[in-house]
Image (cartoon, grey):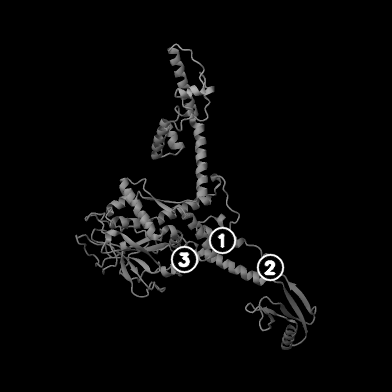
Amino acid sequence: MSKLFGFSIEDNESLSPGAVSPIPPNNEDGVDHYASSGFFGSYVDLEGVYKTEFELIKRYREMALHPEVDSAIEDIVNEAIVSDSNDSPVEINLDNLNVSDKLKKIVRDEFKGVKDLLQFDKKAHEIFRNWYTDGRIFYHKVIDMKKPDEGIQELRYIDSLKLKFMRVRPSKERGAKGAEGIPVLPYSGEQTITKDAKIEEFYTYYPQGMAQKYGSVAGKGVKIAKDAITYVHSGLVDRNRKITLSYLHKAIKGLNQLRMIEDSLVIYRISRAPERRIFYIDVGNLPKVKAEQYLRDVMSRYRNKLVYDANTGEIKDDKKFMSMLEDFWLPRREGGRGTEITTLPGGQNLGELTDIDYFQKKLYRSLNVPESRIGANDGFNLGRSSEILRDELMFSKFVGRLRKRFSGLFIDLLKTQLILKNIVTPEDFEKMAEHIQFDYKYDNHFAELKDHELMTERLNIMVAIEPYIGTYYSRDYVKRKVLRQTDEEIEEMTQEMEEENASGIGVPLDTQNQMVQGRIDADIEAAKALGKTPKEPDVANAKGEGATEAPGIDIKKAKI
C-alpha cells in the first residue's frame, strides 16, 4: 500500500501470533472487502434505482427537504439535542470509571476541549441532523506532525459525498502462506485471521466528489490513514449489499407513495371540481362532414373561453386551446329531442383526505415518530406520566439509542486526544471506554414532572410499608427496592444525616421534643437531689439551663 496521509496509532494485536480463525472479524460499518484498492466494484443496486452510495446519500438529503420528513427529523433532533443559553447539551459521566480522581479530571478537561473543537454547544443541532440524515459523519483530525503530543489542533468536517472508507485485502496468491507459515484461505472474499495477515483499512478522499455512475469517481483520490478520520455511522447496515444506511431509508417508499397520492389528489380536484355543461346540437339529417362543420360554427359562436394570465394579471378570451375543464359539444341527429343543454356535476367527495392521512401516518411510522405529532397544534398534555402513550415511550427509547450511537463521535475524539498526549495507552483506553458515559440534557418540564411523580409514588409506598419495617422488611430493602437508591446514594445520605443530627439540623420534631423534655427532667432530678423544691420551668429558665428551642416547639406545654 502506498504511503497514507495523516497519522496512525499503533496498537497491539488482541490475538496472539498463533491464534487462527477462519471467521473474519465482524465489521459493523457496512464496508465490504474489496479485491483492489480502487473504488470500482463497490456499487450496489438498491431496487434497481440507486447504484452508488453517492446517489443514496443525495436521495436522503432530498427527502429531508420534504415538509413532512423535515418535521419528523426536527422532532427527533429536538428530542435528542436539548440546548439552552446556559447548559451544554451533553456532559461526560465518569461515575462508573474506576480510576484516580486526577485522571478523571484530566478526562473531563479533554472532553471539554473536544467539545470546543467541535463547537458542539453552538452547532449541536446541525451536527446531529447531518449525521441522522446522511447516516454517517466524517471529521478530519488535524494535528501537528512535528508535535503530536499537543493533540488535535483542528477538526474539519468532511462531506459524506467526498470520502469513502475502504477495506482492502492483501495482494496474496491463493493458497499462499503467511509470514509464520499459517495458510491463507482460498479466495472467497475473506482470509484467515492471523497477526500478520491484516486487512488494509484507509479512507479515500475525492476533492471533486464521487461521480454518479456505477461507482466511478471524479478525479484522483487521496488516501488518508484510518486514525486521522473520525467516522460515526448510523449502525443500520444492509448485510446483503454491504452498505451503511440512514434512518431515512425505510421512509423512501412511504414518501414516494405520499407524493403520488398528493399529486393525484390535486389532479382529481382540478378535473372534477367545476361543473361542466353538455350541449346537444341538433344537426338534422346533414351529412357527416357538414354536420361537423355546423357543430364547429355553433361552438365558435357561443363558446367564450376566458384565460387568466398569471404573469400580467390580465383576463383575455383565448379560443385556441381546449382543456378537459371545458364544456362538451355533441351532435344529435334528426328524430332526437332537438337541441338540449344539460349539466355534468362535479366531484362529490373532494373534501375527503382519508387516504392522505393514512400515508402521512405510514410515513411517520417509518421514521419512528409518533403519529400523534402530525400537525399537532393543540399543545401537549402535562398530565400524569402513566397517561403517556405507548408510541411516545417507544419514541423516547429510539432517541436514547440514537444518542448512544452518536456518542461514538466523542469516544473516538477523546481516545485520540488521550493517546496523542500520552495520558493513556490504547490498551488502557479500550478498558476505560466501556465505563465512560455521556449524559444528554432532557427537556426540563417533562423530566421534572416525571421525577416528581415517581418520587411521590415511592413515598406513598414507603408510608404504606413503614409499619412492617423491622418485622417483614429491612430498612436497607426499603432504600434499595422502594426508593431505588444506589449504593453511592445510600452512603451519601447516611453521611449527611449523621452530620445533620450532630449539628441538630434535620432532627424530627418528636425527637427534638424528647430532647427538650429530657433536659427538663434532668434539671428537676438535680434540684430534688439538692433538697430544693422544683418550680415549674418557664421558657427563659429552660433556655438559661442550656435547653435548645427548636422551631415550632412550645416548651411551656412540655410535660414535667
Residue located beneath label 2 in the image? 347
Residue ranking furthest to the top: 531
> Residue at point 35% right, 61% down?
230
Amino acid identity at mark 1:
Gln
- Indicate which disc, 2 or 1, sits on the residue closer to the N terminus: 2
Amino acid identity at mark 3:
Tyr
Left or right side of 253 for 109: left
Displayed quadrant of residue 44: bottom left
- Indicate which disc, 3 or 2, sits on the residue closer to the N terminus: 3
Please state which of the two labelled residues, at mark 2 or mark 1, is closer to the viewer: 1
State whether residue 409 appears in this view: no
Q: How many marks?
A: 3
Q: Looking at the rendered structure, which numbered label has been put on residue 557?
A: none
Residue 195 percent coordinates (x, y): 24, 58
Please state which of the two labelled residues, at mark 3 or mark 1, is closer to the viewer: 3
Residues 549 and 60: in front is 549
- Indicate which disc, 3 or 1, sits on the residue closer to the N terminus: 3
Are circles 3 and 2 on residues that touch, CB within 8 Å? no
Give the quarter of the figure containing the N terminus: bottom left
Amino acid identity at mark 2:
Gly
Position of 211 relative to 352 (above/below): below
Residue 27 percent coordinates (x, y): 34, 59
Q: Looking at the rendered structure, which numbered label has been put on residue 60?
A: 3
Q: CA distance from mark 3 to mark 1?
A: 18 Å
Residues 309 and 50: in front is 309
Q: Looking at the rendered structure, which numbered label has been put on residue 360?
A: 1
